[in-house]
Amino acid sequence: MRQEDRLGLILERLNAHGTVGVADLAAELDVSVASVRRDLQLLEDQHLLTRTHGGAVSSGVLYELPMRYRGGRNQEEKRSIAQAAALLVSDGVMSVALSGGTTTTEVARVLATRSGLKVVTNAINIASELAPRPHISLVVCGGTARPESHELVGPIAEQALAHLNVDIAFVGVDGISAGAGLTTHHEVEAATNRAMIHAAARVVVVTDGSKVGRRAFAQIARLDEISDMITGASADPVECDRIRDAGVGVVIV
């Protein structure tokens, strides 16, 4: 396991439990106690936790993992979700919007092989992957950069999206549930993603199963504002049924 993947898992455990132990982490990660201690020291240097004797505790409330620690989690599931999402995009001239996120990034990588697409995104990392590809027409929204998610957000991005019409939008979330709808950690990011949803004729949520049934701080949209959700087999089946009962097409890969 790469160090960044280990760090992401440590932060996840800390977010869920408020505390982690060195011995437990070493066993779960199948690495030495010394490696875990080095990982904890690195995270403490970034003010993401506070080390204790035998482990670490959260430095306040950790609501959002930095983007650099998200990519390795549920990666195979995200790739399968992306393959299923790409089947909804017809060959030839079609306009596609992509919000930021690790799963939408996987969708972008699949679509990168297509020709004739017009892609709109507010995600800097997605734009950097698609910009060198001459067979894709790329539109990048302006805005204020969020280092946590690599997205351009705020009034400038929302104004740009308000003047566009796209065939389909693939939207990432930090949580989706029958009760709370689509949610994310940051209220400004939520407003920008909402503008993207309003610009699209069809809206598809792409999310790994860990986000299904969860809710984050800010609502992006209600379930009746989206068309479909593509998720993985790790998703809570009861919550998937509730989302389906709300009128959303649910695809599990």
Image (cartoon, rainbow, N blue to C red):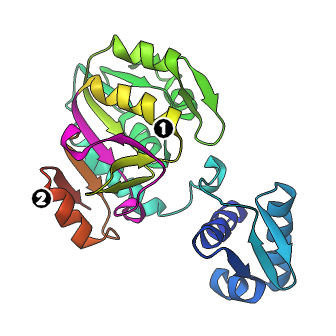
Looking at the image, residue 248 lies above or below residue 41: above
Q: Element under label 2?
A: helix
Percent position of residue 211, x then y: 40, 60
Residue 175 location in percent, x, y?
40, 54
Q: Nearer the viewer, residue 114 or 180?
A: 180
Tell me where residue 167 appears, x and y as whole percent. Answer: 22, 25
Quarter-of-image position of residue 221: top left
> In terms of secondary structure, where does tag 1 sit?
loop
Displayed quadrant of residue 146: top right
Q: Which residue is mark 2?
A: 245
- What is the span of residues highlighted in magenta in the rendered image? 201-225
Q: Which mark is residue 212?
A: none
The kind of residue on which mark 2 rests is Asp
> Disc 1 marks which amino acid?
Gly
Q: Is residue 140 magenta?
A: no
The residue lying at 17 percent from left, 65 percent from top is 241
Report the disc number at residue 100: 1
